[in-house]
Image: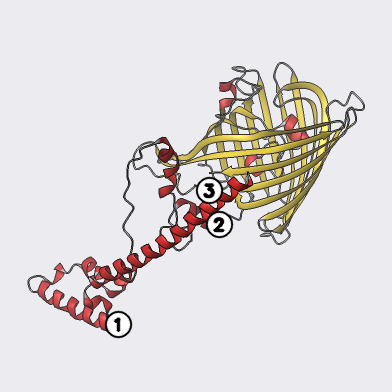
Amino acid sequence: MNKIFGITLFTLLLISSFNNVFASDHSQKHIQHEEEIVLDVPEHKFLSADNAKQEQKNSTTEKEIRSNTNNPEDVDLDEIDDELPENYNEIQSYTPPKKKIKEVESNIESEFNLFDNFDLDKNDDNKIDEDTLLGKLIARDIIRTDIPSYLLKDELTFLPKKGPVSKVQFFGAYNGYISNDWQPGDYDTGYDFGFIQVGAIGKIRGTNTDFKVTLNPRKSSERNYMQNFVADAYLINSSIPHHKIVVGYSRNQVGKEGGSSSYILPFIMRSQISRNFGSTRALGVRLIGNYDLIDYNFAFNSSDRFFRDWFAGPEFTGWVDLKPFGKTDGRYGKLVLGGGLNAGKNHTDYTVGSLYLGYKYKKLWTSFEYAIADGYNGTHVVDNKATGFYGTVGYKIHPRLQIIGRFDQFDPNRDVSGDIRREYTAGINWFIKGQALRLILNYIFCQNEHAEDSHRFLIGTQILL
């Protein structure tokens, strides 16, 4: 085996030496060929900058005199600009002819010749060219993390000249994570999906109405394909100052975090009250108000979830945020005091009340939320009396790097003792391109009164195109 390895290594070295000799000989031929081409360039293109400008000026003046003999307005400014000396700089460098594309003759060539034209370095300077898509993405700088941002926003935004839509932006979203779970005597590793979505947002021509459509192409294990297929489908009108009217299937504001977009969550997993009470969508009409000192969101919906029933019953969802520092231009940070109510009927009556406190100052960010339920309508309808709360603290040690921690407690049934669940989470967010390209690291210690404690280690990736 060692002899075969030695012979193989010697053969590769011999081929490499032969290629170097051939490359050197080819380089000399290439230089000669380049010199021959440069000799064909007219002499006036190798004059000094001052002489070239003077000669060009004289030449241009003669052309203007000839062209102005009949009509002085016939001067072609574009032609004059094309002949300026500064446009001759490309003559100083030789651009090799493009490779001739030939047809492949075997399956092996068909598989591996894909790399022949894969080079993004068109200028042969060992740098990715900025006019390529990859070059544009690398140069694109996204710092904000409080809103969703999209890597291909410019490339996937279109302005139709005709039709009912005046502007439309297509997008795609992916979030997935590797999970490692430790329990006494058991260890599991798996890969889970947070979301895989495609959609579009746009404007209706000649109106103050926008729209959003988001689809889940991946099937859910708990619902049939069509029940899980539509994530968002609504119209939003902003004709009334400081207000928006939303009609359609949209995210329901049950709790602060429960009504937040999945694209801006600080952790891979939502808090326990958000996972159980909120993170739902409903079909209905809502009114959203936004002022300096107060925000509010009132909705009248069908209590159905995931299109299981045509009309399971009525539902009201309301939320109000008070912003005491709303007129201080951020000098004292951003303080939010909020509260809400979600009540309705879906085979059984349910009521969820929530309170929220959030404060953000420079690099520091905190949030605390408490919720209590007498029955609730989340992913499933549950008639238990449950309660829970969480507290989160985050700090950006760098505009792109954030450390976070959370204490999270949930009691699924207040009528039963010894079933409280606590989660202690520590994490790191690396915002490579804001929320558009983000790496997430979470460690969770799960403490259960009715079961053995466990540990979870999650490594997640988020990409918004």
Q: Name the residue under label 1.
A: 48
Q: Which amino acid does label 1 sit on?
A: Ser
Q: Can residue 130 be seen in this view?
A: no
> Which numbered disc flags the more N-terminal residue, 1 or 2?
1
Give the residue drawn at x 43%, y 56%: 131
Specify the quadrant of the image occupied by residue 334.
bottom right
Q: Where is residue 312 in the image (x, y as percent from the top left)?
A: 65, 18
Label 2 sits on a secondary structure element that is: loop
Note whether 392 is above or below 456 in the view shown: below
Quarter of the image for residue 425 reads top right
| Marks 2 and 3, how far apart at CA | 10 Å
Label 1 secondary element: loop
Mark 1 or mark 3: name the one nearer the start of the chain. 1
Rendering quarter of residue 456: top right
Q: Mark 2 points at which residue?
A: 141
User: Residue at label 3?
Assistant: 151
Mark 3 is surrounded, within 10 Å at the Cα level, by few (under 14), some (14 to 19) or many (20 or more) other residues, namely many
Determine if residue 425 is in view: yes
| Crowding near the residue tagged with mark 1, few <14, some 14–19, many ≥20 C-alpha atoms within 10 Å | few
Left or right relative to 10: residue 63: left
Q: Find residue 234 and report its horizontal and vertical position in percent.
A: 53, 32
